[in-house]
């Protein structure tokens, strides 16, 4: 049975109205996406420490799927489904997102400082974050050392998240993610095969978990290479 067939008629109509409203606001959403990326890339501190940066907006189908999942979760929890067209832009935080990819872990501290400076300069209110989602104890210890809130990740997903509210007259929340290139590899594979619904195949789920551990080890190796290179440079000098 499909998710949509589990929805009461009034909820299905509400979701249709929300998605239609989102489609009508396409130009505004596109402008919000572009502006956030331009503002982030105005920071030389960020540019110097990131490998690449990209933005995206949620598709109408992805929004519909998310709203359906949120209704079902609210129903299971005994809560009302309170999202409407009027509350959409502040109820769903990832309609627009920017992702920053960097090579090694210790670049994060300067990237974080750059992001907080950008948010302050351009009038973005930080609603949430930085929050590091991680399953790895060493990674968790590093972020705690920086005073960054951490959140356990049973799915082995790893990334640092910020939720910001845009300064436009029509307020909208948006998401900024920071992760290493190795973490991005795992994230892209998992997103295509194992998200939002977990794969029904045990071998696939186990291989994705093994990939998470492999990419974590690869990140550590990259960290060690840069640390060694820095140590050698200091020693030679």
Image: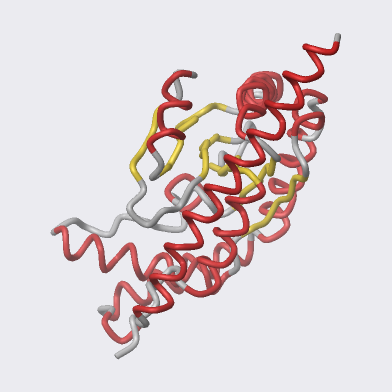
Identify the residue at horizontal 60%, vertical 40% (top origin).
178
Could you say which quadrant of the image residue 226 lies in?
top right
Identify the residue at horizontal 60%, vertical 44% (top origin).
219
Could you say which quadrant of the image residue 166 lies in?
top right
The foreground one among 43 and 156 is: 156
The foreground one among 79 and 206 is: 206
The N terminus, quarter of image: bottom left
The reply, left or right, for residue 111 in relation to residue 82 is right
- In percent of width and height, residue 122 lies at 70, 25
Q: Which of the colour schemes (rainbow, by chain, secondary structure, one colour) is used?
A: secondary structure
- In percent of width and height, residue 119 lies at 64, 25
Rendered view: 89 above or below 201: above
The C terminus, quarter of image: top right
Identify the residue at horizontal 69%, vertical 23% (top origin).
114
Could you say which quadrant of the image residue 26 lies in?
bottom right
Rendered view: 151 above or below 229: below
The reply, left or right, for residue 190 in relation to residue 76 is right
The reply, left or right, for residue 193 in relation to residue 105 is left
Residue farthest to the bottom, as pictured: 1
Residue farthest to the left, as pictured: 78
């Amino acid at each position: 049975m499909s998710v949509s067939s589990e929805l009461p008629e009034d909820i299905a109509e509400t979701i249709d109205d929300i998605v239609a409203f989102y489609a009508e606001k396409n130009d505004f959403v596109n402008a919000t996406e572009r502006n956030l990326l331009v503002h982030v890339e105005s920071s030389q501190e960020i540019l110097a420490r990131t490998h690449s940066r990209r933005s995206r907006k949620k598709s109408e189908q992805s929004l519909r799927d998310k709203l359906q999942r949120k209704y079902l979760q609210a129903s299971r929890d005994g809560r009302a489904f309170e999202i409407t067209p009027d509350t959409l832009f502040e109820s769903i935080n990832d309609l627009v997102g920017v992702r920053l990819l960097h090579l090694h872990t210790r670049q994060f501290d300067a990237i974080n400082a750059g992001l907080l400076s950008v948010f302050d300069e351009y009038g973005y209110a930080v609603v949430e974050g930085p929050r590091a989602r991680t399953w790895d104890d060493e990674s968790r210890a590093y972020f705690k050392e920086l005073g960054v809130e951490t959140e356990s990740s049973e799915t082995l997903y790893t990334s640092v998240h910020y939720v910001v509210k845009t300064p436009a007259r029509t307020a909208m929340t948006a998401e900024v993610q920071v992760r290493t290139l190795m973490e991005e590899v795992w994230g892209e594979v998992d997103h295509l095969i194992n998200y939002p619904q977990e794969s029904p195949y045990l071998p696939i789920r186990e291989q994705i978990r093994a990939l998470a551990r492999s990419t974590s080890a690869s990140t550590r190796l990259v960290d060690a290479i840069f640390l060694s290179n820095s140590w050698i440079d200091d020693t030679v000098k």
